[in-house]
C-alpha cells in the first residue's frame, strides 16, 4: 500500500435490515483527495446474495441508515456540500422511500443531528441534536467566532477533542413526526448532555444517558434515564457509580440494557477498566420505592465493548455485544440472565456493526486484507456479500500479519505481529506502539502498518500490558508505573521479532507511536535509545503536570493512570528524562489537539533543540487528536509522506 492509496479505504458503518431481513442498507465512507473531504453513500445489499450491492444514494455524506419497522422508509443522516463554495453543511435527518424515490429532509438544526432511531409504529424518529446558545456558532450571521462573548467555565468537563466546547451547546433528545409539517419537538431540557436515545417496544418511553446529578461536570458519572416521548415522567434507572452509555430496551420492554464502566474513587476512575453489559428493570410509572439495582451481565475481567464504535443489540434470545478479544473484535450473544455468552462471530477479523431482522443477522467486518465488507451469518460461518475493498490484494499490495508471542523477563506473554516487506532483506524495522494505553492492535487492515511495510520496512506491533482485549487485569498492571512496565513488554516483543526472523536487521531499528504510543516513544528514546536509530513521536503526552491542566481529559486521566503523587508523575513524564535523548526525533502534532495539547510537543521540541539533538517539529493546522485516523485526507497524505521522508533519512532501506 502507498500513501496515495488512501481513497481505496472504503469503510462501512453498522448495517440496518429491512423487517423481513431480505435487504440491508450500509453507509460506506472513504477519503477523497481531490476535494479534501470524506464522502459517504448508502448501499443496498440483498442478504441472500442474489444480486450485487448497488449504490442507493448520491448525497455528499450519507450515514447512519435506519430502516423503519414497517419497511416503508430508510431514515439517515446527510451532510450536504455547497458546489459553489465547497463547504459541507451540518448533518441533518433525511427520509428515503424504501421502494425508490427522492429523499426529503426532516430537520434543520444549526449544529446537526445524530443517533436517529425509529418509533415502533414507524411514525416518528427520535435523535439527538446540540442546542447552541443564542449568538454562538453562527446562529447570528453578524457575529463570528472571534466576536462571541466570553465563556464562563465552572466545571472540569467543559470541552472535548474533535468537537470543542460543551457547556454552550448541550445535546438534547428530539422527536420528529415524519408525516406532519410540524417542527421537531425537544424532549429534554437543562444544562446537561443527553446521548444514546432508544424507544421502548410499545413506543411509550424513551431511554437515554445523561449526567443530570448535582456535581455533574466534575466527575464521570452518567446515569440511565427514561421519560415519555413528550418529556414528561422523567426518572433515573441508575443512581450513580456508572459511566453509562448505549442504553437499549430489552426485547420485552421490561428492562433497559446498557454498557457501563463501573466507576472507582470519587466517580473519576475509568482508566484501563472494561466496559461491560448491564441491565436494569424499568418500573411502571408511579411505582413506589427506589429503582432496582442494575445487574452486570458480563464478567468484569473477561469482556469489554469495542471502543469507540461498539454497539449492543437486544434480541429475544439475548443481547448482541461487540467484544474486544486478543486482537479480534467478536460478536457475542449474552443471556439476559447473565452467564457465559455464546460466540456468534469470531476469528481473525473485527466486527464493526450488527443488525438483526427477519431471522437474518448481518454484520460489517474488517480483516487484515479488507477495511470492511457486509456479511451474514450462514450456518456456523460468514457469507460475504460485498466487495468494496477488492482493490486490496489485487491492484494494491497487502502484507500479511504474522502473529507472534514474546515472553517478558518475568515470564509474562506479550502478543503481537510482524508485517514483513517483499524481498529477502535485510529489512529495517519499525517498532510501532499504539495509543491508549487501553487499546488494541489486531486483525484488521491497518493503513499505517501497510504503508510502512509497502515502503520496505518491517513493522513490529503488539499489545503489551496496559492494552485492552486481554482482560482487565492485563490492562490494570501498568497504572502508576506506565513507562517501565510497557517498555519491558515492548522490548521483549521487539527482541522476539528480531530473533525469529533473520531477514530483520537489528542494526536498523526505529520506534514510533501516537498519543500513549508517543509517550512510550519518547520514554524509549530516553531510556533505551541505544536500541534505536531514530524516533517519531506523535500527539504525545510528554509532561504529566501540564497535561493535567491543559488536556480535555487530563483532570481525571492523569491521576488515574499515573497515580496522584506529583513526584511520581514527574518521574513518569518523558520530558523529565529528555536530557538523555540523543537519537534524532521527529515530533508530529496538531495545532487544535485538545486531548494532548500542542504545548506537549513544543516543550519536548524546545528541550531537544536547546541541547542540539537532531529534532524537527511538524505541526498540522486545523487538526485535532485524530489526524492520522480522520484528519483531512490531504493532511493524512502529507503525514505519510513526512514519515517516510524521515525514515529514508535516518533509517535508509539499504
Image (spheres, rainbow, N blue to C red):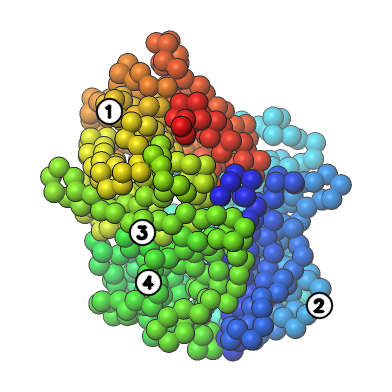
Of 127 and 456, which appears nearest the observer? Answer: 456
View extreme (front): residue: 424
- Looking at the image, tell me whether mark 2 or mark 1 is earlier in sequence order: 2
Which residue carries the number 2 mark? 101
- The residue depicted at 47 percent of the width and 85 percent of the height is 378
Residue mark closest to the camera, 2 vs 3: 3
Is the residue under label 3 in contact with that under label 4 (CB below 8 Å)? no
Occupied quadrant, residue 46: bottom right
Q: How many marks?
A: 4
- Looking at the image, tell me whether mark 4 or mark 1 is earlier in sequence order: 4
Is the residue under label 1 in contact with that under label 3 (CB below 8 Å)? no
View extreme (right): residue: 84
Residue 172 shown left or right of residue 420 in the figure: right
- The residue depicted at 22 percent of the width and 39 percent of the height is 488
- Looking at the image, tell me whether mark 4 or mark 3 is earlier in sequence order: 3
Picture coordinates of residue 367, whole percent (x, y):
47, 63
Which residue carries the number 3 mark? 327
Q: How far apart in space, not on screen, are marks 3 and 1 (Cα)?
A: 27 Å
Badge 3 element: loop
Which residue carries the number 1 mark? 528
Of 262 and 8, which appears nearest the observer? Answer: 8
Q: How far apart in space, not on screen, are marks 2 and 3 (Cα)?
A: 42 Å
Which residue carries the number 4 mark? 346
- Looking at the image, tell me whether mark 4 or mark 2 is earlier in sequence order: 2
Badge 2 element: loop
Amino acid at each position: 500500500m502507498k500513501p496515495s492509496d488512501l481513497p481505496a479505504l472504503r469503510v462501512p458503518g453498522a448495517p440496518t435490515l429491512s423487517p423481513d431481513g431480505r435487504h440491508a442498507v450500509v453507509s460506506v465512507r472513504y477519503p477523497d483527495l481531490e476535494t479534501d473531504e470524506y464522502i459517504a453513500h448508502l448501499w443496498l445489499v440483498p442478504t441472500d446474495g442474489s444480486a450485487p450491492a448497488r449504490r442507493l444514494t448520491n448525497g455528499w455524506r450519507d450515514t447512519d441508515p435506519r430502516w423503519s419497522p414497517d419497511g416503508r422508509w430508510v431514515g439517515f443522516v446527510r451532510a450536504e456540500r455547497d458546489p459553489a463554495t465547497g463547504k459541507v453543511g451540518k448533518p441533518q435527518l433525511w427520509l428515503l422511500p424504501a421502494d425508490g424515490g427522492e429523499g426529503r429532509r426532516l430537520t434543520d438544526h444549526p449544529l446537526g443531528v445524530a443517533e436517529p432511531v425509529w418509533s415502533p409504529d414507524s411514525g416518528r424518529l427520535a435523535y439527538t441534536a446540540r442546542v447552541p446558545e443564542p449568538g454562538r456558532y453562527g446562529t447570528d450571521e453578524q457575529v463570528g467566532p472571534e466576536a462571541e462573548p466570553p465563556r464562563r467555565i465552572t466545571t472540569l468537563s467543559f470541552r472535548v477533542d474533535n468537537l470543542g466546547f460543551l457547556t454552550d451547546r448541550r445535546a438534547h433528545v428530539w422527536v420528529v413526526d415524519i408525516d406532519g409539517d410540524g417542527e421537531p419537538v425537544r424532549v429534554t431540557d437543562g444544562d446537561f448532555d443527553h446521548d444514546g436515545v432508544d424507544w421502548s417496544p410499545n413506543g411509550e418511553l424513551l431511554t437515554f444517558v445523561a449526567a443530570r446529578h448535582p456535581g455533574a461536570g466534575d466527575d464521570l458519572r452518567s446515569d440511565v434515564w427514561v421519560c415519555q416521548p413528550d418529556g414528561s415522567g422523567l426518572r433515573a434507572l441508575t443512581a450513580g457509580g456508572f459511566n453509562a452509555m448505549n442504553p437499549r430496551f430489552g426485547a420485552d420492554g421490561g428492562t433497559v440494557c446498557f454498557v457501563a464502566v463501573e466507576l472507582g474513587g470519587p466517580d473519576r476512575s475509568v482508566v484501563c477498566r472494561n466496559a461491560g453489559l448491564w441491565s436494569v428493570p424499568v418500573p411502571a410509572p408511579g411505582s413506589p420505592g427506589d429503582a432496582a439495582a442494575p445487574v452486570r451481565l458480563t464478567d468484569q475481567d473477561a469482556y469489554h465493548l469495542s471502543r469507540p464504535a461498539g454497539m449492543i443489540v437486544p434480541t429475544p434470545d439475548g443481547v448482541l455485544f461487540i467484544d474486544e478479544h486478543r486482537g479480534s473484535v467478536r460478536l457475542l450473544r449474552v443471556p439476559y440472565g447473565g452467564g457465559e455468552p455464546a460466540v456468534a462471530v469470531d476469528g481473525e477479523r473485527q466486527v464493526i456493526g450488527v443488525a438483526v431482522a427477519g431471522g437474518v443477522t448481518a454484520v460489517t467486518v474488517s480483516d487484515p486484507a479488507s477495511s470492511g465488507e457486509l456479511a451474514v451469518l450462514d450456518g456456523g460461518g460468514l457469507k460475504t456479500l460485498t466487495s468494496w475493498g477488492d482493490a486490496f490484494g489485487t491492484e494494491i499490495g497487502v502484507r500479511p500479519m504474522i502473529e507472534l508471542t514474546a515472553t517478558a523477563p518475568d515470564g509474562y506473554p506479550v502478543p503481537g505481529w510482524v508485517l514483513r516487506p517483499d524481498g529477502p532483506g535485510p529489512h529495517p524495522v519499525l517498532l510501532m506502539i499504539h495509543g491508549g494505553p487501553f487499546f488494541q492492535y489486531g486483525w484488521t487492515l491497518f493503513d499505517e502498518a501497510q504503508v510502512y511495510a509497502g515502503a520496505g520496512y518491517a513493522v513490529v506491533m503488539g499489545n503489551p500490558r496496559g492494552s485492552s482485549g486481554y482482560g482487565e487485569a492485563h490492562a490494570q498492571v501498568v497504572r502508576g508505573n506506565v513507562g517501565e512496565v510497557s517498555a519491558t513488554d515492548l522490548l521483549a516483543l521487539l527482541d522476539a521479532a528480531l530473533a525469529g526472523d533473520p531477514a530483520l536487521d537489528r542494526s536498523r531499528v526505529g520506534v514510533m507511536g501516537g498519543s500513549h504510543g508517543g509517550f512510550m516513544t519518547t520514554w524509549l528514546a530516553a531510556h533505551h535509545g541505544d536500541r534505536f536509530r531514530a524516533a517519531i513521536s506523535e500527539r504525545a503526552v510528554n509532561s504529566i503536570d501540564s497535561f493535567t491542566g491543559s488536556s480535555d481529559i487530563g483532570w481525571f486521566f492523569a491521576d488515574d493512570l499515573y497515580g496522584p503523587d506529583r513526584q511520581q508523575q514527574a518521574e513518569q513524564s518523558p520530558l523529565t528524562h529528555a536530557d538523555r535523548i540523543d537519537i534524532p526525533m521527529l515530533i508530529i502534532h496538531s495545532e487544535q489537539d485538545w486531548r494532548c495539547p500542542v504545548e506537549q510537543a513544543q516543550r519536548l521540541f524546545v528541550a531537544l533543540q536547546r541541547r542540539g539533538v537532531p529534532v524537527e517539529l511538524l505541526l498540522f493546522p486545523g487538526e485535532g487528536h485524530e489526524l492520522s485516523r480522520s484528519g483531512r485526507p490531504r493532511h493524512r497524505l502529507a503525514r505519510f509522506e513526512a514519515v517516510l521522508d524521515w525514515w529514508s533519512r535516518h533509517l535508509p532501506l539499504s
